[in-house]
Amino acid sequence: MATFKAVCTLRFHSRWNLIVLLLLVSLASFVTASVGQERIGPLDQVTVEQWRDDLSVLAQQMQARHANLYHTVSPSRFDLSIRNLKRRVPALSPLKIVLEIESIVASVRDGHTRVMDNRIPFRRYPLRLYWYKDGLFVQSAQRNYAEAVGARVTRIGKLSIDEAISAVADIVPRDNDFSLRERVPWRLVTPEILFGLGLVDNMERAQYELERNGRRWSIEVAPLQQPPMECQGVLRQLPSDWSDARQPGTPPLWLRNPCESYWFEYLPDSQTLYVQVNEVQNRGNVTLAQFFERVFAVAESRPLARFVLDLRLNAGGNLDLLRPIMVGLIRRENINRRGKFFTIIGRRTFSAAQYWVDELEKYTETVFVGEPTAQAVNFYSDAEVFQLPHSGIRIGVSSLRWQPMPPWQDRLSTDPQIGAELASSDYANNLDPAINAILRYDSAKR
């Protein structure tokens, strides 16, 4: 009897020990979740077999839809990445699986083939970074972190800045390295990405190490509820509670109207007609063709020493709209002359804007100024979108190959004849190295 009581007591205590253990495990899970805060909702309900089925669909659909899936990644490497992820699914969180899928898609090395919707509500930290000629800097920040503005980023979480860039680059869809300069910085201020890639242990409190004039220090930041709005990759308007590295004064031309699809200004002192086109689309009451009719009218009615077409913020649109513009540029002798016609290009010049650059290179006397473009001169585009059946992740896959340039000129970008990459000091002092290079250009010496 005593033995029975002892056994019952032992079982009773064991049951309570188990309950306590489960409560402790639950508490630990809660603490871990509160630190990690993946917060990805319905993806948590996707089972291992459903993830594996999604990965099979991913491989099948990408192979079926892409114009040439293996133009950069080999079939064996692509298949191995799918098989390895299927094997590792049970050990991974939904967030990590999603980022692995982004890495597989990005391995195609085609800026139009990308994850369109990964079903995760990405947030942002209260920092805006820019990859200048002299490094990655805090370009603007919420006023609580005003001291960070204008400082170089040297470390994010556990990794040096070079290691952090390398880690994030694996999930960035791109044609070339200048695509990275455009697309990496915003990912380096995305809590879910930094946590999922292992840069930080707690996405609610991330550390950034900064440097200015030999002094190094760290800041700790929490995610924003609502990030500031952007146009063409540029802050739409600096929020009242944010600080910016740019000094007070008149902004350079390229930053004056980033939210305008197209606009121009005649500069009488230098007899320069500056035309910025930020997307190849018809907007408002004036079509792109009608806009250029006005541009050409001004070019014919004013003294014209230079014609500047700025496409550095133009990420594309509808290339069918370009024909009347190209015809107009080619025909006008007061524009289409070497040393008089300049086109500014850069890390955001992509898609239909790249096609426009190709046409300008072939048929006009323009001089390219700025940075390399974000896309290859012959590129994959026209993405077909499909959805993975269980997770709902949407993928865009390039279905066509555009070849404006001959195959022996199959370059990864259009490079400028006059390099003019932005430095952090240029931005801070409202300077535009591209415009300055154009104003200094002497065709007689070239």
Image: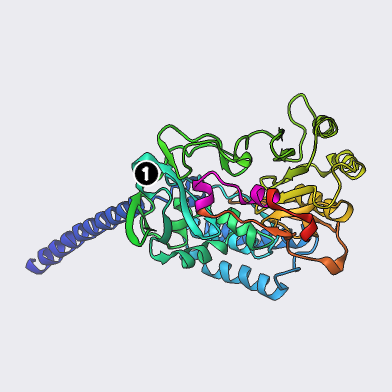
Query: What's the residue at 30%, 53% (across, down)?
Result: 31
Q: Is residue 205 visible?
A: no
Q: Name the image quarter holding the N terminus.
A: bottom left
Q: Position of residue 293 (x, y in %)?
A: 85, 31
In this view of the protein, which residue sits in the foreground, 228 or 12?
A: 228
Query: In the image, which residues are magenta?
Result: 425-438
Residue 80: image location, x then y, percent: 63, 73
Residue lying farthest to the top in this orientation: 285
The outermost residue toward the left is 2
Residue pictured at 10% horizontal, 69% vertical = 3
Q: Does the magenta-highlighted stretch encompass residue 428?
A: yes
Looking at the rendering, in which quadrant would you find the C terminus? bottom right
Q: Which of the two residues, 121 or 370, is positioned nearer the viewer here?
A: 370
Q: Is residue 76 above or below residue 420?
A: below
Whole-percent x and y of residue 159?
A: 41, 66
* Residue pointed to by mark 1: 146
Q: Identify residue type, mark 1.
A: Ala
Q: How is the image coloured?
A: rainbow
Check if residue 228 falls in the magenta segment: no
Closer to the camera in the image, 335 or 157: 335
